[in-house]
Amino acid sequence: MKRQASALRNLRQKCGGSYTSDDDLPEVKLMPSPLIGVPFIQSRLRPPKAQKGMYYSTDWEKSALVSNFQKRGWQQVPSFNGEWNFYWASTQNCRYIFGIDHPYRMRSDQVINHFPNSVELSRKDLLIKNIKRYRKDLERRGDPLAQTHSPDTKLGIGGTRYMHLDIIPMTFVLPSDYLLFVEAFHRNPASTWIVKPCSKSQGVGIYLVNKLSKLKKFAYDARTFFPPINRDTYVISKYIDNPLLIGGKKFDLRLFVLVTTFNPLKAYLYNEGFCRFCTEKYDQTEIDNVFMHLTNVSIQKTNQEYNSIHGGKWPLQNLWLYLDSMRGEGVSEMLWTRIIETIRHSLDAVAPVMANDRHCFEVYGYDIIIDNNLKPWLIECNTSPSLHSTTTNDRMLKSRLIDNVLDVVVPPKSLPDEHWDKTPDPELLKNFTVLKPISVLEPPTEVPIRGKVRTTKKRKTKCTAISPTAVNLSVPPPAEGEPKIRKSTKERR
């Protein structure tokens, strides 16, 4: 008898490709099929007898994970016997656990590190569709966040006139949106675009184009009917050709975001992160050189110019010191606020479609690129950000990250509990920035009082979106061979 496909697999199979958007891609031993022995499955529904302490299981033998588990005195158990209380799983096994084609149901004292359909945020084409729907919903409701510039405003990289929602470059899904892409390409034939497969990671299959002749495959697929299951899906985005450069090299940011629940949305941005640099100096004309355009470590480490000592990485603190010394005091604070708004918008966009299971939390790896005007652009989001360490600083950062995450997602001095409201002690959030709802600061209103006019301001209770013109960004970027960074008088948190 043919096995029935899981609901999650049916849900997004029409998008083509697989579901993987992970930085870490190990050889994970998948759980055995539940159809082999139903009594075995039923036995693992029962909690372990005479349990002492916390039991954990993991699909990743990473030092950042195992060292933190052992430091807490947790005991390791196999993942397939179901005795675990905490499971750091691969996305494949997580989807298997939440599938409807087997009788496994999690106990109230179990927690797992992925939401059932986190693909809505991590898969490139679904992220784009969710953000576009989010914009239309806000515009339909007349939300101030959907404010737009005047019609005569020149469109930028985002291709929209939104003041606060222009967070991603102009993007189309191929081959379904090929004709729409052609129209946008003809409006600016000299532009460069970047093509990415939707279901791959680590820079695999990414390339740059500036001619339609390089996209003949998609032109053919757009005119030919294929069942969605049998064709690959790509996204093509306008290339950010004016990135912020340091030492003449392009870089992006890897940031970590912890989400404990999507309804209501509780998300925390980790205050530490790092910059990933290219190994060769940026040249916009050489679009075939991946070592100057793609910042993925898996690509850069294959270049002979790769430095294994620092790994092409820069702590986030160094970036803040650099910007404050070269662009002016306070610029780093402004940029950090804009990054917070960008990430919060992306989470708000997917929250309505996420399956909010009480047993779940997730650590996302956000990739952000900053352009020369200090505007952050969301590139993609990974459901399993790499915990592999390339340098000593990298290992220490990721170990601190996991330590702080475990403090937040596990109730203090007790086993996991699905009835816990997931409100941690504020002291445990000292290394995180809480991603609060965003509101637009409305202009003052005039209230007549006894023949006079009194101007009042509305009280702000939420995070306020920064206007693009609120800070003077006319300071030119540092020239190549810039001086050493002066230590900032205002230390970053």
Image (spheres, helix red, strand yellow):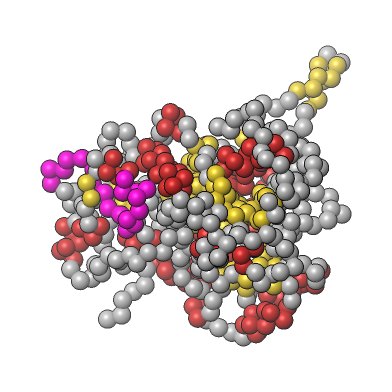
Position in image of residue 158 (x %, y %): 72, 57
Q: Quadrant of residue 124?
A: bottom right
Q: Residue at x 56, y 66 (%)?
A: 303
Question: Horizontally, is 91 left or right of 323 in the view?
Answer: left
Q: Residue at x 55, y 32 (%)?
A: 493
Nearest the eye: 450 or 282: 282
Residue 61 within the magenta-colored segment of the rendering: yes
User: What span is colored magenta in the figure?
Assistant: 49-67
Is residue 486 among the parts visible in the rendering?
yes
Nearest the eye: 280 or 490: 280
Is 98 drawn above or below residue 491 in the view shown? below
Q: Residue at x 38, y 51 (%)?
A: 113
Residue 52 within the magenta-colored segment of the rendering: yes
Residue that lies at the very extreme toward the left in this rendered image = 50
Is 348 drawn above or below residue 204 in the view shown? above
Q: Residue at x 18, y 66 (%)?
A: 38
Position in image of residue 491 (x %, y %): 59, 30
Position in image of residue 291 (x %, y %): 61, 65
In what quadrant of the picture does the N terminus appear?
A: bottom left
Question: Horizontally, is 388 left or right of 177 in the view?
Answer: left
Q: Quadrant of residue 54?
A: top left
Position in image of residue 392 (x %, y %): 44, 47
Is residue 355 among the parts visible in the rendering?
no
